[in-house]
Amino acid sequence: MVRSIESITEPHYQSMSKHGAQGTIQASALSRKLPRHVAIIMDGNGRWAKRRFMPRIAGHRAGVEAVRGIVRACARKGIEVLTLFAFSSENWRRPPEEVGLLMELLLSSLQREVTKLHENDVCLRFIGDRSAFAGTLGEKMAEAEALTRDNRGLKLAIAVNYGGRWDITQAARRLALKVAAGELSAEAIDEVLVQEHLCLADLPEPDLFIRTGGEQRVSNFLLWQLAYTELYFTDTLWPDFDDQAFEAALASFASRQRRFGLTGEQVEQLQSG
């Protein structure tokens, strides 16, 4: 059974105060050796297939197996949140045949995996512009979220038709509507209020970002949320990202000193105090 989130009691650092200044940072967050929230760009499926003289969709299917592995690993280690970038808002530019196959794979994977996730206490959600997913796929996404909503284990967020710029834009639009309706003054808008209108606002920000496949960029993923995230890039293609590769990423994270704008000396004082 997945470890309950209630058993993870260390407080996360406070991101910003209501006045926009850096809030008090908890020493436990600065010294934590295991991330609470891991965010991953799962890159390299197509190249994995190409190297094996297989169609690209074969690489995406192999990538689903890697997803199962990382979900198990995070649950086993007591990591609280896992966010996976499955399909970006830019991915619609890919050949229509590939996009269609990806949508079919998403639907079939969802139908096959949601019961297993529920049995293991995983809480599943989808983030992104859901308006593009009408019909059966959209219905299955909503059903999966409803089924697992009250689960208290690993929080698994799947980003589909998601973009970091879209996320910030939709937050700004929601705030603008409140100002127009007289529910909010423009002067009251600060970083905390913007944060509260973003996707994943109710969860800790990512501690560790992983990108597989050798590229070293964040590709419009969680742009706001990654402000103080530790970045880890690996040449390993996503279908080959196994427990050993994940351990290497976690070891890299554990070796770093997280300062959140403080000096190293300040961090050491907080940790010793």
Image: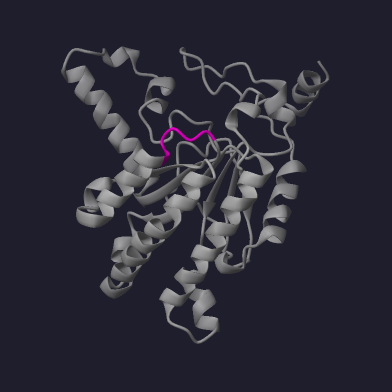
Tally the numbered discs. 0
Q: Is residue 190 above or below residue 95?
A: above
Quadrant of the image for the C terminus? top right
Direction left: furthest residue: 181
Residue 221 shown left or right of residue 30 in the figure: left
- Magenta stretch: includes residue 139: no
Seen from the viewer's position, the closer of residues 219 and 39 is: 39
| Quarter of the image where one finds residue 110 | bottom left
Residue 188, image x and y in percent?
33, 13
- The residue lying at 59 percent from left, 54 percent from top is 70
Examine the residues drawn in magenta and state their main secondary structure: loop
| Quarter of the image where one finds residue 213 | bottom right
Residue 257, image x and y in percent?
74, 36
- The residue lying at 28 percent from left, 69 percent from top is 100
Residue 93 shown left or right of residue 23 in the figure: left
Direction bottom: furthest residue: 53
Seen from the viewer's position, the closer of residues 209 and 72 is: 72
Q: Which residues are magenta?
A: 148-152
Residue 155 shown left or right of residue 165 in the figure: right
Residue 41, image x and y in percent?
51, 55
Direction right: furthest residue: 272
Q: Is residue 16 above or below residue 120?
A: above
> Residue 128: in sight, yes or no?
no
Seen from the viewer's position, the closer of residues 190 and 140 is: 140
- The residue lying at 51 percent from left, 46 percent from top is 119
- The residue lying at 73 percent from left, 26 percent from top is 263
> Residue 150: in sight, yes or no?
yes
Quadrant of the image for the N terminus? top right
